[in-house]
Image: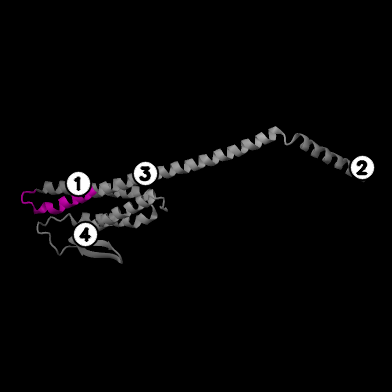
Amino acid sequence: MGAVKLDDLATLVAAGAALLTSFGVPATYLQARSAHAAAEKAVEAAQIGARALHADARRTAQREAFISLLTAVDVFGRTATHRYILPIASDISNTDLEESTVAMFEAFDELTKAVALVNLDAPEVLLPTVQRLRDHAGSLTCACQTDDSDHDDEALWWVAGEHGDEEVPTDTVIELFNSAHQEFVKEVRHYLNADTAGGTSD
């Protein structure tokens, strides 16, 4: 009985092999296989395109955030300078000082918002510089509120130093802010140029 089953099996195998030899692989199978391969390639191409679009959108958002921050820094620097030198004028009033102070604080608020926007999606390498820029802007806000027309050089202000907070004169506060501004511009240029060359890593 067992021998008969083996013989039957052998016959079926031989018949199947003969059919494949005679007629080949069914056309519907080949078509399905080809369609599957084409679909896989289409999905892969779509994924690559989506990643490229996402990267472009992110770079655009980053550039806009950088521009917004640089603009805010420029406006703040001008309003802070105006407030700092205003007491030198002989014909100023308390209203002039108050309006100038308000303008400086509003500019600082805009700078702070711009910093927050950059921090949302900026590469890690830029974050320390962005934070220093914001910290020194805050110190400058305090230092520029003086009402003394002589600008007392003995006045000291707390700033964020390399080894912790430290007290420095007003001129140093201004220098630290300007230095942080220049450093940020330099690092943004380097980041964007590396991005254009395809060498940026987040």
- Distance of label 4 from label 1 (alpha carbons): 21 Å
* Percent of width and height locating residue 166: 25, 65
The single residue placed furthest to the right in the displayed view is: 1
Q: Quadrant of residue 140?
A: bottom left
> Which residue type carries mark 1?
Ala
**Residue drawn at point x = 8 percent, y = 51 percent:** 89
- Distance of label 4 from label 3 (alpha carbons): 30 Å
The residue labelled by disc 4 is 175
Q: Nearer the viewer, residue 135 or 63?
A: 63
The single residue placed furthest to the bottom in the displayed view is: 163
The single residue placed furthest to the front in the displayed view is: 22
Over which residues does the magenta segment extend?
A: 74-92
The residue labelled by disc 1 is 103
Q: Earlier in the sequence, mark 1 or mark 3?
A: 3
**Tag nearer the camera, 2 or 3:** 2
The residue labelled by disc 3 is 61
Q: Which mark is residue 4?
A: 2
Judge whether residue 113 can be spotted in this image.
no
Residue 101 forms part of the magenta stretch: no
**Residue drawn at point x = 78 percent, y = 35 percent:** 22
**Tag nearer the camera, 4 or 1:** 4
Q: Is residue 185 left or right of residue 59?
A: left
* Percent of width and height locating residue 195: 38, 50
Q: Earlier in the sequence, mark 4 or mark 2?
A: 2
Q: Is residue 18 left or right of residue 42?
A: right
> Which residue type carries mark 3?
Ala
Q: Earlier in the sequence, mark 4 or mark 3?
A: 3
The answer to whether the residues at label 4 and label 3 have Cβ atoms under 8 Å apart is: no
Judge whether residue 96 can be spotted in this image.
yes
Q: Is residue 51 left or right of residue 1?
A: left
Q: Earlier in the sequence, mark 2 or mark 1?
A: 2
